Image: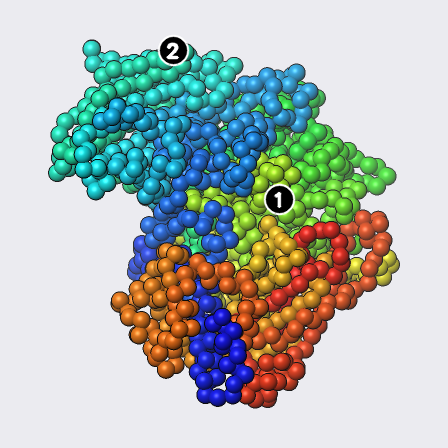
Amino acid sequence: MFFDNVYSQRKEKDLVLLIWFQRIFIIMLLIIFLIFNCFITVQSIHINSFFNNKFLRHFSTRNNKLIYASPIAQSNLSILSVGEEISQVATARKTSKKLYDLLINYEDSYYDDENMVLGTDVITKNTYTRQPYVANGYIGSRIPNIGFGYALDEYSIWNPDVTDNPELFNNGWPLRNRRYAGSFVSDFYSLQKKLNSTNFPEIDDIGYSNVISSIPEWTNIKLTVIDENDRSFNFNPQDISVNDITNYHQNLSMQNGMVTTDLNWLNNTLHINSTMFTHRKLYPLGLLEIDITLNREYLPTDFATYNISVFDILDFNTSHRTFLRDMGPSYDSSKMQGIFMVVEPENVPYTNCVIFSTTEIEQLDITGSVHRNITLDDYVIDGMNSSISQVAKDITLSTEFPKLKIYKYSSIISSNYDGCKNNTYQDNLNEAKHLALNSRGNFQNLADSNTQAWVDLYDNAFIEIPSDSVLELAARSSLFHLMSNARLHNISEDRGLPLPVSGLSSDSYGGLVFWDADVWMQPAILPFFPDVAKNINNYRNATHKQAQLNAKQYGYNGAWYPWTSGGFSNCTSTGPCIDYEYHINVDIALATFSIYMNGADGIDDTYLKYTVWPIVRDAAIAFTEYVQYDKQLDVYETFNLTDPDEFANHVNNGAFTNAGIKILMKWAVDIGNHLEEKVDPIWKAINEKIVIPKTSSNITLEYSGMNSTAEIKQADVPLLVYPLGYITDESILNNAIRDLYYYSEHQAHTGPAMTYPVFVAAAAGLLNHGSSSQSYLYKSILPYLRGPFAQFSEQSDDNFLENGGLHPAYPFLTANGGFLQSILFGLTGIRYSYKVDSDTNKIARLLKFNPIKLKLLPGGLKIRNFKYMGQVLDIIIDDYNGTIIHKSGNKTITIQIPDRSSIRDQDINPYRGKNKTKEDNRILSKRKSNIYELKPNENFTIPLFVTELNAPGNIVESKQITNLTEGVAGDVAMSAVDGNNYTHWQPVNKAETARLLIDLGPGNEQTITGGMFLWGQRPAKNVSISVLPHSQATEQLFQNITYFAEHFEFPNRERTILQLIQEVDNITEPEVCQIFSSDGVCDAGFTQLLNWKSKDIDELIQQFPNTPGIRENFITIVDNLSVLPSEPYYPEYYEQALIEILPSNKTKFSVDYSKVEYYKKSEVFEQSQWPKTRFIIVSIQDTYDKDLDPKGSTIKEIILYS
């Protein structure tokens, strides 16, 4: 009604019109602000955080020399003042917080970026995506909703009302068991005769499969409370109801790995706080503190006492795939010290794991002083002889003595823990007992030493992305999650560290080790923690002997690693050695050789000779016997294999596998010559002649015979660019660009989270136009990162009932590794490499550096403490330059800068019909590069390569864009303005008008005169454009609102806009009106707006620009423009399933403001005064083709001219 009244006053040509018009402008701007600065968690910007301050102090005190590789072409750069740059970065960071709304499970989550704390204040039934975990690389435990204990999943966030489908709670292949919050110990694998789901069941007849065993839950505590009416209440995950919990908070600190859970129970009369962690240095030690306090303000007036019993439990039934060897109490003389349990992995009787638990309880008086120490002097074994508890019964909690502090110390030692390999379980029990008992009474000291151990581990390794809070969170959390599941010490050289896909908090994928560890996780760890990366690789070195036996089993020389492995590396039904993913052998060779090329301390020619060479040599030998030579074609081919795209099994000439073999053969020749080892001459021949399948238009096929009907699960062909580095001349470069474009358009929406980090690296290195390397970066996290605890899911859509019956691995550490690599090696262009001296055949290691301007990330990024060749570097990309700072070490490093002049990313001829597509007949050449030396205490700086606009004059390319309506899972709105004609955004529902909001940025107001839309194979039916005219008053208002955002927090979406604004120095309503109203008076309509609740704003936003009144602010300048295909239909493309790049359909338009309805009847602006705008809304209706697909049109690129 308010807006209707405004609209009616528009028709009256008097002074009131002008007043209302100004107010509506102001209202609109406030709403726009709410879009971008989301009142959920607008926080103060702390640019000089702890880490930044430390870095700035370090940088400013150095006396480093500065090396410029070439003069900076300032004329090509937009130079801003320091204040403007900081403001731009701060504005971008505030804007980025709106992206949290796009992450699943973040609506009730929070993130304290200064203290690196993640959390939630909403409790749900137990479900895997909402649970944190603790882990230290040796032991780990997923934590249920109440903060400790064991729990089965009982709730699906995707289908909360479905309770009759047990598959909703299941894990995926190969176990397909119910998900649970349980505990694990590294390298504790069982043998299974049969599994629920395998790819090659016939191999079960040859040998058992091995999968991880979980251990008895060491965090298991039960509290029993009896009130004065003898009513009994149990507090444990099995008995608690979430409806009985209030004032809930659960936090995870990424600074020290601690999880705290805080809640009220029993009608708020009891406050329970728990803190749990696994010690970062004393790896077998897990600790739990539980504080139980009477909430005096909630106690009834006649309250007397609570009688509490505490049960410290070890329950065999909370373990999986184990055999109970022993359990019992432990005594010192007649005093009970604790309880223990010994389990073995099923069918592996020579391995065991001991859990020893000891607990102490303090009761505190009202002053907080310890009143008495309570012993757990009794124990109970259940009737099934499968559980033991140490018990403290009948502890009286009263207003005089209102608090209990429970400390539980658990020590877990397995046979694979370094130094315990040959121990009996009694030896391991003695070790576990000794550690646990010596920890008693030292909880706070252990907590402090754990925090210090995390500080020492991080060693200031850090990634800063000052303009984007979400990306920086993903980088921080990725480092944290990877290092929580890996460790530096107490790993035997002859065993190494097997790193499963989901680490130590889940048995997703059976806890098995895949290529994920070698290609995705280890490379992300290597630049920061090279010794940890070496431990991971030592697992492959330790199992190399078995790989040789595997090859012999199938009649080969050399070595064949299995696709999956665990405690053993034999060929199994989950991990076949032949006729499947042979590329695992290339992956392991690459990971091993990368450690040498990184060159950490001690990684020299001895490591190359005794670790790298045997793995590379044996892979080359095995592949030499595997490939088949075609004499007629003079080529080598491969048969019956599966590439990374597992939607295509048992194919021939897999591109990634064959390219990997090609490069492997080169490594074998180069390393062999360097070490003066015997080199088989056929290796060079295979390198030169192995088939890489291609189409006639030079698009690389995933495999021979592939056609366009194939749905592509994940990145496959783009892996040739990164990490294989399969570009040696301009021919391969041009093909790689075609590959990037084609495969970008053909990835499955529900594909895994390891896909788009590869596209980041490929786009950054291959494209000289646009900013799609950064839009791919957002595609790498927004669909996959889950709240509240920043864990990646394997899939963009976890809904089992809608995603084809897939159960994602969770957490998916592969994605953490991939995302880190997309920054470390993608956006920076950093690569480990080497050159061979043609005279001596000796290898010389070097570092490639190919940085680009990050248009979507003002302020760029900083990588601190990147370790290379035993030196410590900082890598900084700002808005103008790329810099490598040689911080410490005494070695000179070699840096190679590639020449990008040979990149022709726009010279791609799309399909124009049979025999009509233009051929590319350019002369090919080797890619050039420049070599520089960086000495200790010097800096190396080069100007960034600035990508050109994809469409010259496009004012919206690489600008901030937000989708106001939902997109298809996996899509991000940035793809519509990233300057790449082969990325797209697609609405999830064509029946709803889709809307995209574009912000040109402060001080960049433009007049739109025309433009063009590029569509995929599903053009829209109609498209409209609306703009918000700019004025000096609106800019002033933005400055006022920005001040509010920078200085105050607005966490409660139930509060009104007025209440939020009044946070500023207790500002009164008249003062608010003075700011937001031209005459300083808030009439009824304006007051109504101010009293809207902030949560209602988003509902209003969905109506843009159809809400009366708002239409008068966002002026429609292109109204329902009909979309007609500009390209012909090519029936043969579909009938023959051709692999081709199709041309985009184009819709061109120009704006005639004299025909815009608003200006035709407005007396506020003359028709000749075309308005400038900062904010633009693009509305897309329906699809051109009336088909049954519910999804909307594919918008490849929005191009607007001024």
Is 247 above or below relative to 12? Answer: above
Give the quarter of the image for residue 38.
bottom left
Q: Viewer-nearest of labels 1 and 2?
A: 2
Is 361 above or below relative to 774? Answer: above
Looking at the rendered structure, the number of numbered marks drawn on it comes to 2
Amino acid tagged 2: Gly
Which residue corresponds to the image point at 66% horizontal and 42% vertical from the top-left?
A: 713
Is 1161 above or below relative to 702? Answer: below
Q: Secondary structure at mark 2?
A: loop
Q: Secondary structure at mark 1?
A: loop
Residue 960 % position (x, y): 52, 65
Residue 470 % position (x, y): 45, 54
Q: Nearer the viewer, residue 554 or 211?
A: 211
Which residue corresponds to the image point at 81% horizontal and 40% vertical from the top-left?
A: 634
Q: Residues within 10 Å of mark 1 (few under 14, many from 20)?
A: many
Amino acid tagged 1: Gly
Give the quarter of the image for residue 408.
top left
The residue tagged 2 is 383
Residue 734 % position (x, y): 70, 57
The residue tagged 1 is 751
Q: Residues within 10 Å of mark 2 (few under 14, many from 20)?
A: few
Residue 1142 % position (x, y): 76, 58
Asked if one can make out residue 1139 in the rendered structure from this viewpoint, the answer is yes
Q: Nearer the viewer, residue 1183 or 613?
A: 1183
Asked if one can make out residue 95 in the rendered structure from this viewpoint, the answer is no
